[in-house]
Image: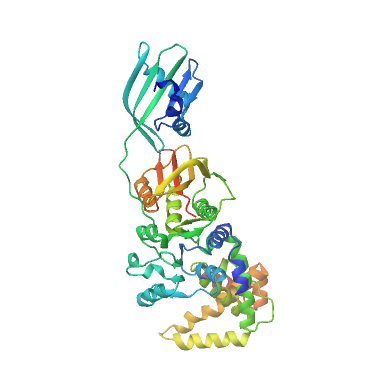
Amino acid sequence: MNTASIDFRFLLDCDTSPLIIFDHKGHILWLNEAAEILLGYADHRELFEMALAHAPQDFGHQTTLRELHYRQLSFYAFQVAYNSEEWIAIRLFYRPKAKEERHLDPDKLLPTDVNLLLEAAIGMFRMQHDRPLRLLADQDLPQLRIDQNSFSKLLRKVLESFRESEAIQASLKMTIGEFIRIEGKRYPILRLKLEADRRITREDTSIEELANSLQILAFCEPDSVVLDIPFIR
Amino acid sequence: MNEANETIARSPAVAQILRGLELTRDLYVASILIGERYSGKRTLLKRLFPDLPRVSGEDERALSAALEMENALIITEFEAVKYPRELDFQNKRILAVADGPVDPGILDEKFAFIYRMPPLRERPEEIESFTRHFLSQAREDLMIDEEIELDQARLDLEQNLRSLKASVYREALLQSLNASEIERALERLFAQSLEGNNAYRENLGLLERPLLKAGLARYGSQLKLAGVLGINRNTLRKKLHEYRID
């Protein structure tokens, strides 16, 4: 069989390494599914600049070993390739992850209106700290099952880390196409994101530990916290 | 106590606490209210959770038993719990009250919602209504028919609601006493305290000082007051000097 009939674009599209092809002005000509997810966290202009800075001098490809982190996405290297002045491609390689075993304790999980918990936590935060906080939440979220007390503690700790921040933006919404795998089952992700100009990072380990005990992925940055909450019905 | 229940949420800070507790009232979370004694924490919880069983943190055995039995509980005097780390609040609705400081590590570990109740002196919106409420209670309890005008400066907020109530009752009682009751009160005081070798002069002030102060406040000038009292102006001046009355 000759290879002419093989749809290589399909293979690239479902490859787990993000691949983006830019034109010479930095506009995206094509990207695969993994790159679509990456662009949820990374700025495409930044990736284009990086591609230009690390492109081989002549037509061809060049791989650079470098740790890159875009929220929860971690890469150990990227490759830049081109064989025309019209386009340039960048492909990022995920850092291998040890498989984390996650377990659920169904007795601790109670049906919960997460908006209500969030409102109460924000109310308490506002009582103690005079900081402007804007919340954008999907009010029609169905109930999810969660350990109410520990999750409320987590919210308190996360909010407390913004006690010296200026304008705080918070959003709560379902993500599309992303899942958390626990005990072999895939759960959609409810994402709570808080960001500001800066935050106190001293308690980040404690935030991450508590989140971990709740099977929540916490991504703490100097200016933001993202909680990826498994949406367990 | 219904009026007190309504009064307690008039200040913005307490209204916020109330709102937070209302939002989580059906959830299985642990909340704690920390504040000075008699600042109204129990009144607030009583308003929201009138039927919830209560147990004191001073009685460790009763507390452990209640946590075994109940899935919703009010724990008072939480600061007195000796081994708070051993308490299991998992999937329970816990409303705790602490009148004194609690180890921050324990607060962080055990409680999702930590509310700080401001003392009454920081809640001016509530002082007036509580004063009115206690005054109406005092008039009813002490069977006082006449109107009572309270001197705000005499209200004692040192121990929050407790001292406010006591000071309102005391003022109401004082203003309702007639001459013979005042005489009886003085007689009782003298009976208890009369001793030494100069008691006449020492105790005379109890009669003369209020007489002169009230007279001066009412008549303004020493000349007029001397006339009303029927004493010499110089004698009056000497007395005022002796009692350091301006």
Determine the residue positioned at 38% across, 67% down.
Answer: B79
The quarter of the picture where the N terminus of chain B appears is: bottom right
Determine the residue positioned at 36% across, 67% down.
Answer: B87
The quarter of the picture where the C terminus of chain B appears is: bottom right
Number of callouts: 0
Give coordinates of residue B232: x percent, y percent. 62, 75
Question: In the image shown, does B212 or A52 lie closer to the viewer?
Answer: A52
A57 shown above or below A209:
above
Determine the residue positioned at 62% across, 73% down.
Answer: B2
A196 shown above or below B238:
above
Question: In the image shown, does B185 or B14 lie closer to the viewer?
Answer: B14
Task: Tell me which corner region of the image, top left, top right, bottom left or bottom right, holds residue A104.
Answer: bottom left
Give coordinates of residue A217: x percent, y percent. 40, 46
Residue A165 shows up from this direction: no
Give coordinates of residue B213: x percent, y percent. 59, 72
Residue A154 shows up from this direction: yes
Question: How is this picture coloured?
Answer: rainbow
Identity of the residue furthest to the front in this view: A1
Identity of the residue furthest to the right in this view: B146
Give coordinates of residue B45: x percent, y percent. 52, 69
Question: In the image shown, does A29 or B6 lie closer to the viewer?
Answer: A29
Question: In the image shown, does A10 or B80 lie closer to the viewer?
Answer: A10
